[in-house]
Amino acid sequence: MLYLVSTPIGNLGDMTQRAIDTLQSVDLVVSEDTRKTGFLLNHFGIKKPQLVFREDNEKKVLPKIMGLLAEGKNIALVTDAGTPAVSDPGF
């Protein structure tokens, strides 16, 4: 299952409990920048493997993500701030 997880735009206190629960439950977190997402995960005490997914590595990484989803893995897709592909300031 692929989860699109919204992240706060500036204030980590704006993170929803549902988003935290989702990040705690997945097998992998896919993000634009592991440093920023790592800071977010660390803030909430979440230890999950991360995979960088950006425009410059899309063709290489997308097949891996699709393969993991086909295996039944649960993956969260986050952006540096906002909602992936919906309300994403960097998109």
Image (cartoon, rainbow, N blue to C red):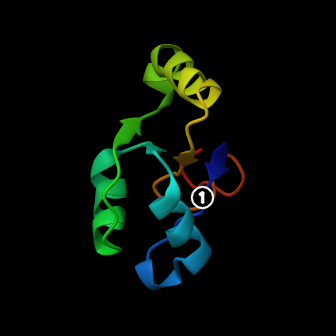
Which residue, as the protein is rendered here, is positioned at the far front? 72
The image shows residue 64, relative to residue 1, as above or below, that is: above
**Which residue is rendered at x = 72% and y = 52% of the image?**
86
Q: Is residue 83 visible?
A: yes
| Viewer-closest of 78 and 65 | 65
- Residue at label 1? 5
> Within the image, what quadrant is residue 74 found in?
top right
Where does the C terminus fall, quadrant-wise? top right
Mark 1, Cα crowd under 10 Å, few <14 / some 14-19 / many 20+, is many
Residue furthest to the bottom in view is 13
- Residue 11 visible in the shown view: no
At x 35%, y 63%, the residue is 41
Q: Position of residue 71 (x, y in %)?
A: 58, 26
Is 87 in front, or is 4?
4
Image spot of residue 17 (x, y percent): 56, 79
Q: Residue at x 50, y 71 (%)?
A: 20
Question: In the image as oriented, which residue stretches furthest toward the right?
Answer: 86
Query: The N terminus is located in which quarter?
Result: top right
Kind of residue at badge 1: Val
> What residue is shown at x 44% (from left), y 74% (from top)?
10
Q: Is residue 39 left or right of residue 81?
A: left
Q: Is residue 15 above or below residue 74?
A: below
Asked whether, in this view, residue 73 is left or right of residue 57, the answer is right
- Could you say where residue 90 lies in the image, as x and y percent from the top left? 53, 49
Q: Position of residue 31 (x, y in %)?
A: 45, 44
Q: Secondary structure at mark 1?
A: loop
Q: Nearer the viewer, residue 54 or 40?
A: 40
Depth order, front residue of 28/53: 28
